[in-house]
Image: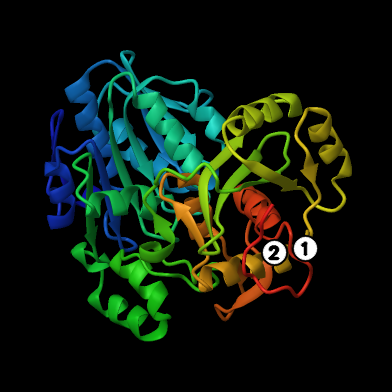
Amino acid sequence: MIHDLVSVSGNKATIVPHAGQLQAWDSDNRFVFVIAGTQSGKTSYGPWWLYREIERCGAGDYLAVTATYDLFKLKMLPELRRVFIDLLSGWEWKAGERVITNGESRIILRSANTPEGLEAATAKAAWLDECGQDNFRLESWEAVQRRLSLYQGRVLGTTTPYNMGWLKTQVFDRWRAGDTDFQVIQFKSTMNPAFPVEEYDRAKSVLPAWKFKMFYNGEFTRPAGMIYECFDEKLHKVTPFEIPAEWPRYVGVDFGAVNTALIWLAEDVERKAFYVYRDYLQGNRTTNEHARIALEYAEKERVVKWAGGAKSEKQQRWDWNAAGVPLQEPVISDVEAGIDRVIALFKKKQLFVFDTCAGLLDEIGTYARVLDDMGQPTDKIKDKETFHRLDGLRYVVHIDYPAGADLVGFSG
């Protein structure tokens, strides 16, 4: 790994990166993502990239963000301390503030599973480690971009792919489509000269193909346990178009004091097809505030029905009705029954998602079953309580369906 290839003379450190690291080092793109195999030298490269950005951009604040607090303690912090404290002079670690500083610049260390901790800083650059993990959600990626917007700061992302969420849809797909803001560099674990080829071959012989491709080749593929594995980006993700005024609209609502989600569908009655054209997820607002925003959207749209909440959430529905939104109880509130309906619509080519609905697409790509010790999916949904947009979708896709009905469309 790169810190093993560092030589120090006085106050000068010389690094000798391998070919994959060098490609990232030479990139001038604003958003550079190294998506590579395990132990390939991703994390050890990050502090050097961040140090160069500090040298380029000057005094100010910089971000170092990893997926969880445990990863911060066990992985990111040791690498930053090795470079800034052990090898470079003039820097100190302030544990109480979780910053590394030289008096003029600060590296603010945070974990993505508490995105509110990212909102206070205005930064000049950011290094995101293990940003492909499930805990590093789209909201954290968006928060980082907001913190960098004033200076149009650069980002380095270093990770192994773990799912088909925002890293795939908002980074990899944009790069592959030719967005010059992005550069994606991929390489295998064996790009690191210190990684044993024998271990790479052993992993290939014993691991499921999807896991080996992701964890040792740094390639995106569908992991075991994906609930909406039938979702095909080339088919179900569509470019937004002007929705005809006569098409009926439907809104699914998932309640939450911190996260309230709304999913908006339009129905092409002739084709019996449904299009998710808007997703909404906001927190720290009252029911009246959420309802007012929803009604403002609905003023110019033919919203014929609203549905949301579990069977037990009667009070929340009453509150929405009191705020002017005629919210109904979904015909089916059961989670698995709702999932079955969504899958059926995808399979019948009757449900499509606008590519502007980044939050919903991220949830579709990360919604998965817990795997057992043999790597087989169980009945349990991983982090079930975090998929608010998908809950809203479940509530609305079968709003008019009696149990057992064929999924051929609904009308107002």
Find residue 119 and name its label.
none
Identify which residue is drawn at 82% across, 40% down.
Answer: 317
Identity, as a three-letter code, of the amino acid under mark 2: Gly
In the displayed structure, does residue 267 sit left or right of residue 361?
Answer: right
Identity, as a three-letter code, of the amino acid under mark 1: Asp
Label 2 CA crowd tier, 10 Å (few <14, some 14–19, many 20+):
many
Q: Relative to 245, does residue 201 appear above or below in the rendering?
A: below
Residue at the outermost bottom position: 205
Identify which residue is drawn at 77% across, 63% down.
Answer: 334
Q: Residue 277 or 21: which is nearer the viewer?
A: 277
Circle 1 SS class: loop
Residue occupied by mark 2: 338
Residues at marks 2 and 1 touching, judged by CB atoms closer than 8 Å: yes
Q: Which part of the image, by quadrant, shows the N terminus?
A: bottom left
Q: Residue 62 or 293: which is nearer the viewer?
A: 293
Find residue 334 and name its label.
1
Q: What's the colour scheme? A: rainbow
Circle 2 SS class: helix
Q: Residue 255 or 76: which is nearer the viewer?
A: 255
> x, y percentage for residue 45?
25, 46
> x, y percentage for residue 230?
49, 71
